[in-house]
Image (cartoon, helix red, strand yellow):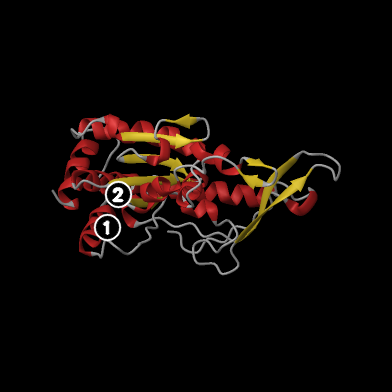
């Protein structure tokens, strides 16, 4: 079974669920992935809610059917729980079983050493395991007596093998690069902490920069776009945060194209 066949199985399952519609860009992506060199990385950029998860699921299913494993990494733990439920439900419904899907992050050890055929994890757990310092072994690795390591240093070769024999998918990776450019604007977005008081440990995350929003044709809805346009104009008009420290909340709305 090839990746196109796996995609058709997943597409059939998603089509049976309410709210799913045809996404031409996903069909195009699968075609390109099928033609690409599997040893080389590739980057997918699509709006939130467009269906990128279906691509991750397709790759994971294809790898499993061919005897390989997949690690899907997320920058936030809040993303993992919901995605794990969805991936397990899908794998069950396409006939391979939800038990192939494991979960691993701080406090959850369903998939030690990321050994499950499909493992969802956090970027920090993946990074440690990729260095041979699996969280399962951290106490052994960092345990010292009289300044020297003592006892077993853990199963670092197994950790390395578990990662580097897997296909790795980094989901929502843009959240790791908040200081880089977004949507092609060279100035980018910069985040920083704004403290309530110099001696207080209370703070909020603020950002400055320029962001561009766009939608592919098959997602564009003229009425919703008009509503969003009105909301952005109201935000600019109300000048939320204009009188606050650092001006957090100030927005200038510059519609590039609207009809």
Is disc 2 surrounded by few (<14), some (14 to 19) or many (20+) residues within 10 Å?
many
The residue that appears at 44% across and 43% down in the rendered structure is 155
Q: Which label sits on residue 236?
A: none
Apparent side of residue 20 relative to residue 232 in the rendered image (left or right): left
Of 155 and 36, nearer the camera is 155
Of 100 and 87, nearer the camera is 100
Q: Which image quadrant for residue 186? A: bottom right
Residue 191 in picture, x, y percent from top left: 65, 54
Q: Which image quadrant for residue 143? A: top right
Mark 2 and mark 1 residues within 8 Å of each other at the beta carbon: yes
Apparent side of residue 35 relative to residue 39 in the rendered image (left or right): left
Kind of element beneath mark 1: helix
- Which residue was labeled with disc 1? 29
Residue 33 in picture, x, y percent from top left: 25, 59
Is disc 1 surrounded by few (<14), some (14 to 19) or many (20+) residues within 10 Å?
some
Of 183 and 194, nearer the camera is 194
Q: Is residue 38 visible?
A: yes
Above or below 65: residue 207: below
Residue projecting furthest to the right: 199
Of 241 and 223, nearer the camera is 241
Question: The C terminus appears in which quarter of the rendering?
Answer: bottom left
- Which residue was labeled with disc 2? 55
Kind of element beneath mark 2: helix
Above or below 57: residue 107: above
Residue 229 in picture, x, y percent from top left: 51, 51
The residue that appears at 77% across and 53% down in the rendered structure is 246
State which tag comes first along the sequence, 2 or 1. 1
Q: Between marks 2 and 1, how big is the CA–CA gap?
A: 8 Å
The residue that appears at 40% across and 55% down in the rendered structure is 215
């Amino acid at each position: 079974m090839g990746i196109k066949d796996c995609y058709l199985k997943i597409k059939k399952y998603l089509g049976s669920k309410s709210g799913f519609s045809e996404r031409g860009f996903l069909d195009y992506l699968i075609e390109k992935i099928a033609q690409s060199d599997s040893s080389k990385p590739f980057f997918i950029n699509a709006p939130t809610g467009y269906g990128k998860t279906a691509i991750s699921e397709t790759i994971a299913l294809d790898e499993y059917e061919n005897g390989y494993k997949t690690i899907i990494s997320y920058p936030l733990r809040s993303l993992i729980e919901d995605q794990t439920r969805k991936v397990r439900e899908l794998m069950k419904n396409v006939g391979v079983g939800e038990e192939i899907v494991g979960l691993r992050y701080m406090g959850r050890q369903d998939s030690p050493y990321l050994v499950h055929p499909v493992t969802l994890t956090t970027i920090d757990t993946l990074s440690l395991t990729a260095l041979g310092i699996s969280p399962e072994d951290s106490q052994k690795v960092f345990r010292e007596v009289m300044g020297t390591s003592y006892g077993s240093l853990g199963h670092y070769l197994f950790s390395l093998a578990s990662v580097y024999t897997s296909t790795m998918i980094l989901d929502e990776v843009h959240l790791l690069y908040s200081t880089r450019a977004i949507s092609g604007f060279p100035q980018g977005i910069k985040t920083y902490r704004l403290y309530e008081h110099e001696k207080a440990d209370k703070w909020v995350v603020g950002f400055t920069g320029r962001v561009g929003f766009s939608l592919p044709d098959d997602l564009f809805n003229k009425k919703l776009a008009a509503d969003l346009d009105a909301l952005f104009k109201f935000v600019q008009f109300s000048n939320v945060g204009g009188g606050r420290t650092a001006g957090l909340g100030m927005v200038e709305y510059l519609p590039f194209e609207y009809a």
